[in-house]
Image (cartoon, rainbow, N blue to C red):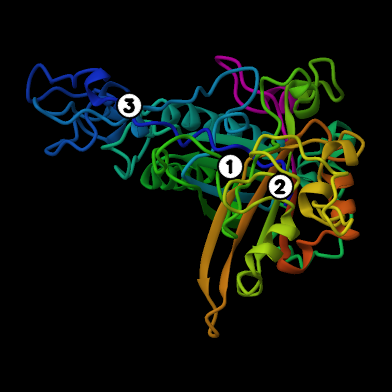
């Protein structure tokens, strides 16, 4: 974990329902082929009926008087673009991470066909459309709900497809860290898919559809579920909190920063060429040892992080966005922000300018027989080069971060995430057909 977590843009003020479009009524009771994109004013309506044969025919419009869709369901991200979705968008309330391995005997041709299917599915679902074949109706009442689906390639993918010469140097294995307790069965993978949405059923629907689309070409290696605060849960927009109760995300890079693209995305003329406008995702399952953490006094917790728990302000004074004064001392001459405080160690100016865009999910996978929670952070960070982003920061944390005794890294993966697909293309086409 670092201090540069994504601020929570998903916690937006509720929209006035009267400002939203009126629901559209079907012309006749038998009206069919109306997609969920046409239902952005109809969430929560009852009496929806499936149209003509097969889910691919679409969803029927709601009856007159249906309640308008709230702002939560109406949000829509675009599939096609310069970058893949799910990188710069705000935090979503629900998330699924899933890694696949190509099946025995599957190679480049099968991988290309799979990415073509997955891309077509992602485009439909993100637009609020049902799956093209065998839709399960799980999300039939909902709008797009800010759904994003993102695809990446692991190191072994290039061996399986005979594309070793196209494997980026930045996809070198991550070094070992002293806080690692990695489960290899829940690490790495040939293909990685990130799914996020502001509605749990929409997110699950996407996960299930992607899994079914894999068919015989790939099998699931591991899968993890996460969550964040729901949009509108706070009285005003604010930075997210993690499961330790800390405001987490104050110093995350922002797209408005002048050097944001340089730090987060591979340049258009980068190497290899197929990674132009792409990024690299480091994925870590970080367990928080909450029983130990919650035994600390408030002041001890704040000294571990270097920020006030109530509002995220640095211990050197000010409010959440005040620049941290690392040289300021108290009456006894000691630094107000301790030398091993997490927020001090992770600052870019203390790591050669290393920066990464963190876009995590919290997770909770139950309790063991002693009542100890298996909970923490599904850490996802984005950078143009992990050897200049994640790796130097994590090495420094490994040498003396005050937070280290209270967390444990239990799974890890590094994935090359190509740039966005243009209209008519699928993700990874320039690699697989280049």
Quadrant location of residue 403?
Answer: bottom right
Disc 2 to disc 3, how far (Cα)? Answer: 41 Å
Tell me the residue that label 2 is attached to. 190
Disc 1 to disc 2, how far (Cα)? Answer: 14 Å
Q: Which SS class for mark 2?
A: loop
Number of labels in the image equals: 3
What x and y, as percent, mark residue 121? 47, 32
Left or right relative to 122: residue 106:
right
Q: Nearer the viewer, residue 17 or 361?
A: 17
Q: Which SS class for mark 1?
A: strand
Q: Is residue 434 visible?
A: no
Classify mark 2: residues with Cα within 10 Å, few (<14), some (14-19) or many (20+): many
Q: Nearer the viewer, residue 297 or 150?
A: 297
Classify mark 1: residues with Cα within 10 Å, few (<14), some (14-19) or many (20+): many
Tell me the residue that label 3 is attached to. 15
Quadrant location of residue 430?
Answer: top right
Q: Which residues are magenta?
A: 415-434
Left or right relative to 372: residue 394:
right
Q: Nearer the viewer, residue 307 or 240?
A: 307
Q: Is residue 431 visible?
A: yes
Asked if the magenta segment contains residue 431, the reply would be yes
Q: Nearer the viewer, mark 1 or mark 2?
A: 1
Q: Nearer the viewer, mark 1 or mark 3?
A: 3
What x and y, as percent, mark residue 110? 64, 38
What x and y, as percent, mark residue 378? 62, 53
The C terminus sits in image quarter: top right
The residue lying at 52 percent from left, 38 percent from top is 238
| Residue 194 marker | 1
Quadrant location of residue 50?
Answer: top left
The residue lying at 78 percent from left, 53 percent from top is 342
The residue lying at 67 percent from left, 19 percent from top is 256
């Amino acid at each position: 974990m670092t201090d540069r977590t994504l601020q929570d843009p998903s916690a937006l003020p509720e929209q006035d329902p009267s400002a939203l479009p009126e629901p559209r009524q079907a012309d006749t009771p038998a009206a069919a082929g109306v997609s969920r994109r046409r239902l952005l004013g109809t969430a929560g309506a009852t009496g929806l009926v499936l149209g003509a044969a097969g889910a691919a025919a679409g969803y029927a419009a709601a009856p007159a008087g249906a309640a308008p869709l709230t702002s939560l369901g109406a949000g829509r991200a675009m599939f096609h673009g310069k970058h893949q979705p799910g990188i710069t968008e705000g935090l979503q309330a629900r998330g699924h991470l899933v890694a696949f391995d190509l099946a025995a005997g599957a190679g480049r041709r099968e991988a290309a066909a799979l990415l073509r299917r997955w891309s077509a599915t992602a485009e439909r679902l993100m637009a609020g459309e049902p799956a093209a074949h065998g839709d399960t109706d799980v999300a039939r009442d909902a709008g797009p709900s800010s759904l994003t689906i993102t695809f990446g390639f692991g190191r072994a993918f290039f061996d399986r497809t005979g594309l070793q010469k196209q494997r980026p140097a930045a996809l070198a294995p991550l070094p070992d860290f002293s806080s690692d307790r990695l489960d290899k069965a829940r690490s790495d993978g040939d293909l990685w898919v990130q799914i996020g949405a502001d509605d749990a059923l929409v997110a699950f629907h996407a996960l299930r559809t992607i899994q079914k689309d894999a068919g015989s070409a790939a099998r699931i290696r591991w899968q993890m579920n996460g969550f964040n605060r729901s949009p509108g849960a706070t009285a005003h927009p604010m930075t997210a909190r993690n499961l330790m109760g800390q405001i987490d995300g104050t110093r995350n890079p922002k797209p408005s920063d002048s050097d944001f693209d340089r730090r987060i995305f591979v340049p258009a003329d980068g190497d290899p060429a197929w990674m132009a406008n792409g990024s690299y995702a480091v994925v870590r399952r970080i367990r928080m040892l909450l029983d130990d953490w919650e035994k600390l006094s408030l002041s001890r917790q704040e000294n571990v992080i270097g920020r006030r728990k109530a509002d995220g302000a640095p211990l050197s004074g000010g409010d959440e966005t005040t620049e941290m004064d690392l040289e300021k001392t108290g009456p006894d001459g000691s630094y107000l922000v301790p030398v091993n405080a997490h927020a001090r160690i992770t600052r870019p100016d203390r790591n050669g300018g290393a920066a990464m865009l963190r876009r995590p999910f919290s997770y909770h996978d139950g309790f063991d027989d002693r009542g100890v929670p298996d909970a923490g952070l599904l850490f996802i960070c984005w950078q143009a080069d992990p050897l200049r982003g994640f790796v130097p920061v994590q090495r420094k944390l490994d040498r003396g971060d005050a937070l280290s005794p209270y967390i444990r890294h239990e799974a890890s993966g590094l994935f090359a995430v190509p740039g966005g697909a243009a209209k008519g293309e699928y993700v990874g086409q320039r690699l697989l057909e280049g």
